[in-house]
Image (cartoon, helix red, strand yellow):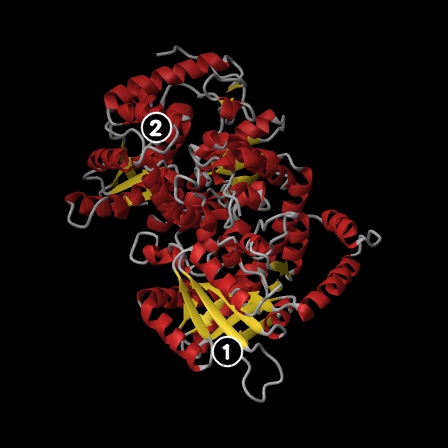
Amino acid sequence: MQINSPAFKENARIALHDVNLQKALGNLKAGFPTKRAAAVARMPEFEQLRDEGTALKNHILENLDIYLEQFEENVVKNGGHVHWCRTSKDACKTILDICKEVDAKTVTKGKSMVSEEINLNDYLEKNGVEPIETDLGEYILQLRGDHPSHIIAPAIHLNLEDVSDIFHEKHHRPKSSDPAVLMQEAREMLRQKFASADVGITGANFFVAETGSTIIVTNEGNGDLTQTLPKTHIVVTSIEKVVPTLEDMTLFLRLLARSATGQEFTVYNTLSTGPRRAGDQDGPENFHVVLVDNGRSEMVGSEFQEMLRCIRCSACMNHCPVYGAVGGHSYGWVYPGPMGSVLTPKMIGIENAGLLPNASTFCGKCESVCPVRIPLPKLMRHWREDEFSRHLSPKAVRWGLGGWAFFAKRPALYRILSSSSNLFLRLAAGKKGRIKKLPLASGWTNWRDMPAPSGKTFMQQYKSGKKD
Amino acid sequence: MQSSQKPIQVGLFVTCLVDMFRPSIGFATIKLLESAGCQVEVPEAQTCCGQPAFNSGDKKTTQEIARQTIQAFDGYQYVVGPSGSCIGMLHYYVDLFDEDDPWKARAESLKSRAFEITSFLTDVLNFDQVLASYEGHATYHDSCSGLRQLGIKQQPRKLLAKVAGLELSEMEEAETCCGFGGTFCVKYADISNRMVENKSTYIQDSGATTLLGGDLGCLLNMAGKLKREGHNIEARHIVEVLAGMTDEPAIGEAAYSLGKPL
């Protein structure tokens, strides 16, 4: 996926005026947050579960090497292969090599944000392998030449009409506004692809050290068909998704479904433990796990380690008022919303991530719903410190801040500044009590009035003897 | 309340916005604190809590301002301010200094003494003798820092319930950010505008004619929007109502006397 993060501000401006997108975002607000709240209300021990999930993730991150090696050992024992890939490029090349080994023409894919992260589809296409997305949302996006705007609901930025239009154009069938008809249409189109694919690629929501298993959760069942029908199954996943035991996995599954969609549990929870064994009725002959690092091992032990607790539930973006206003594409890369504002700079460099960590009011709602209690505002603030110390913040911000700081650090001078600004604002407002247009504050007055000071400053009045 | 004892010594953290835009909030806070048995002083060396620098990533300036504020409030039994956001910032000071820095302990001390006004009255003083009356239908906006950082939710409602004549209706999304966010409202003006536009709709839908909140920043933002959209809804800081000081026009409303400037 192209990096478009530095254009966040422009992207956001366009998104704010996109009528269809705004309609779709309205649906988001009415959907996931409400369902999550209901699911949490049904489960009194949810807070305790969050604490357990947080502690377990911390434990995993402190012993990451041990669990990863244990996982590899068990995958090999089961007859599979593990490939360690430090960069996106390594991962893409490894996957292509496996495809070439089995002379693959087409590859079916279950949804995987990691494969978006490493830009796998483009790479495969350029090298003569056709990737076919099978998650309904991803399938729609692929037809449109579009990208996900949300990590669990990739096509949430689209409305029913958008889907109907692209299906009509690509499937050459009559238009329909009935979701069930459209769904059936997609199903028919995808069936043949499932059956004829040479390789199936899925992501993994988690993978289990004690058994060497990987798991995907879906609500469509497309993941099952992707990983059981083709002769070769490749799992592409990132290193922090390891969990020690099957039981640990269930803790995260409970947190994930409730936080993501407000479900008690996702409809399909599909485990893969190596290739088909003698006597198995189905399953792939070859089983590969591609473990992607892509900057994550550097985060271990750094001030960003807590970000690696993320289980990709999307609760932070579902509840973020900024995401709710501008949608996921505005963030300009794979991971949107608050989690993306922390993760994106790490993966593509703060220089390429624009001012994403600034795209937050620090309202803290993201942290308050995060199932593994990631302090997202604190981590965004780390990035802001990094930007500031490297002089990446805009000049206007630096100079404005410098001027303000000069006075804020000198109380006596500060009083002179505040009382004269106070007078200026009162004069500007006249008798109206508010100001419609203020030079240098057009960001404010373009859209709202500026309430005028209601009298001299507090300090002036207090010193002149007014008590209350 | 504490008439038989030595009065509680409180240093008032005025907040820069209250100082500049709405002094009455400062005076209402003093009145409330005094009626709860406190002796209030206003240290002169205070300016701003340092939030603009902190949220812009300028750690050095934040530390300098933190040290100045810590010093200004040394010796007060409690530090109280009419803003969850600014008091929340005083709590963040502890994160600015390393363990072996002597300022760390002083920041810890300030944190243990610093309270937002409704939380101080309710949680610390157990004060419920609100004698004010206010004839009106109000709705309350939960400002983010007060709500999520300091756990302020029931305290203002508990106090408002004591105000004679006041009817309180909850708005939808009362806990959603209004889009102010300090410098955010200027840096991302159009996103901020969308957020306050949404907020305005929720406020109107509540049927209330008065909007109350505990943070002047948010109130300036919402009042500015409500006025621009032409709604007849007045915005006030909660302490004005609790202290019975609602005789002056609401935030952003007409006809202040210019007085004798300076």
Q: Which residue is mark 2?
A: A398
Residue B12 appears left or right of A127: left
Q: State whether discs 1 and 2 lie on one chain.
A: yes
Using the image as rendered, state which of residue A452 and residue B244 is in the foreground: A452
Q: CA distance from mark 1 to mark 2?
A: 54 Å
Residue A404, quarter of picture: top left
Q: Helix or strand or loop: what does disc 1 sit on? A: loop
Q: Earlier in the sequence, mark 1 or mark 2?
A: 1
Q: Is residue A367 above or below residue B138?
A: below
Identify residue type, mark 1. Answer: Thr
- Determine if residue B60 is in view: yes
- Residue drawn at the location 71% of the way across and 64% of the way down: A190
Using the image as rendered, state which of residue B258 and residue B179 is in the foreground: B179
x%, y% of residue A273? 50, 78
Using the image as rendered, state which of residue A245 and residue B245 is in the foreground: A245
Using the image as rendered, state which of residue A144 and residue B145 is in the foreground: A144
x%, y% of residue A300? 32, 58
- Determine if residue B152 is in view: no
Q: Which mark is residue A273?
A: 1
x%, y% of residue A157? 64, 47
- Pointer 1 local density, CA inside 10 Å: few below 14, some 14–19, many at least 20: many
- Residue drawn at the location 39% of the way across and 49% of the way down: A346
Residue B56, quarter of picture: top left
Q: Helix or strand or loop: what does disc 2 sit on? A: helix
- Residue drawn at the location 18% of the way across and 39% of the way down: B75
